[in-house]
Amino acid sequence: MPRLGSETLVIATHNAGKLKEIGALLDPFGVTCISAGSLGLPEPAETGKTFVENALIKARAAAEASQMPALADDSGLCVAALDGRPGVYTADWAERQWFEGPAGRDWYMAMGKVEGMLCQLGPETDRSCWFACVLAIAWPDGSSAVYEGRANGSLTWPPRGTMGFGYDPVFVPAGDSRTFAELDPAEKHAISHRADAFARLVAEQFG
Ligand code: IMP
């Protein structure tokens, strides 16, 4: 199994928030992070059918272009009664093309779409779901490592809470009655799918 050394790690994201979050998680292990965006690397199309495929596409593209090890993540919401949808299309379900102005993401619309599909299946429909997060590391020699994390829960309606992002207001983590958007960020980060995937990465790479 390849392991991260003291070399700089490229974070395959153009999102400054993600770079900050991942950089803070890896800092205690002496890993210096730099974003693919700041290196001017192109963003590959996420054409995979699974979170693993998409995370590997992003990590491999960044490792090849930079000739440095690269880390990418892919995540989304999977609903049991919808055969795991929206899954890798989680962000796409929020895409809205306004009549005027730029396209944007409308999370209320996306949550409503999921709820509408569940309602169509009937009042007794299983509302269980999970957030999935895959972290992939790729090295310039072509080797790679993949870590999968998961947070189980169920969907509630109407949305509740003002913290977090995306589908957090309708996701009630297993063992709690509050939604992710009602949890203090530190509480969410302790039990999230991202935390689960990171714990697996840290155990294997730095354990
Ligand atoms: P990506 O991994 O950046 O492609 O994001 C996929 C989408 O999944 C995001 O745009 C969010 O809508 C959703 N998602 C991923 N993680 C979370 C989370 O922790 N809370 C709410 N939504 C999430």
Image (spheres, grey):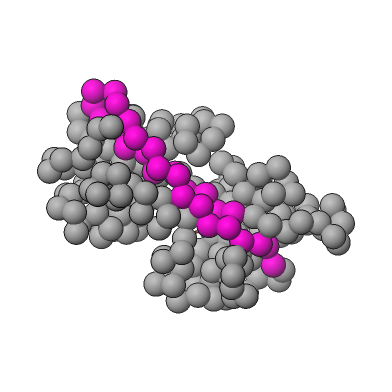
Q: Is residue 202 above or below residue 58?
A: below
Q: Nearer the viewer, residue 170 or 154?
A: 154
Q: In terms of secondary structure, what is the magenta stretch mainly?
A: strand
Q: Nearer the viewer, residue 160 or 40?
A: 160
Region in magenta: 130-156
Residue 205 within the segment the image draws in magenta: no
**Is residue 74 at all visible to an observer of this figure?**
yes
Q: Is residue 137 above or below residue 86?
A: above
**Is residue 41 at all visible to an observer of this figure?**
no
Q: Nearer the viewer, residue 63 or 202?
A: 202
Which residue: 20% across, 57% down?
A: 27
Which residue: 76% across, 56% down?
A: 126
Question: In the figure, is residue 170 to the left or right of 137?
Answer: right
Which residue: 22% across, 37% down?
A: 3
Which residue: 54% across, 35% down?
A: 50
Number of labels in the image equals: 0
| Quadrant placement of the N terminus | top left
Q: Nearer the viewer, residue 15 or 204?
A: 204
Question: In the figure, is residue 74 to the left or right of 198?
Answer: right
Q: Position of residue 17 (x, y in %)?
A: 34, 58
Residue 141 within the segment the image draws in magenta: yes
Q: Position of residue 179 (x, y in %)?
A: 59, 71
Q: Position of residue 29 (x, y in %)?
A: 18, 54
Q: Position of residue 200 (x, y in %)?
A: 37, 49
Q: Quadrant of residue 87?
A: top right
Hey, which residue is sitting farthest front in the picture? Answer: 207
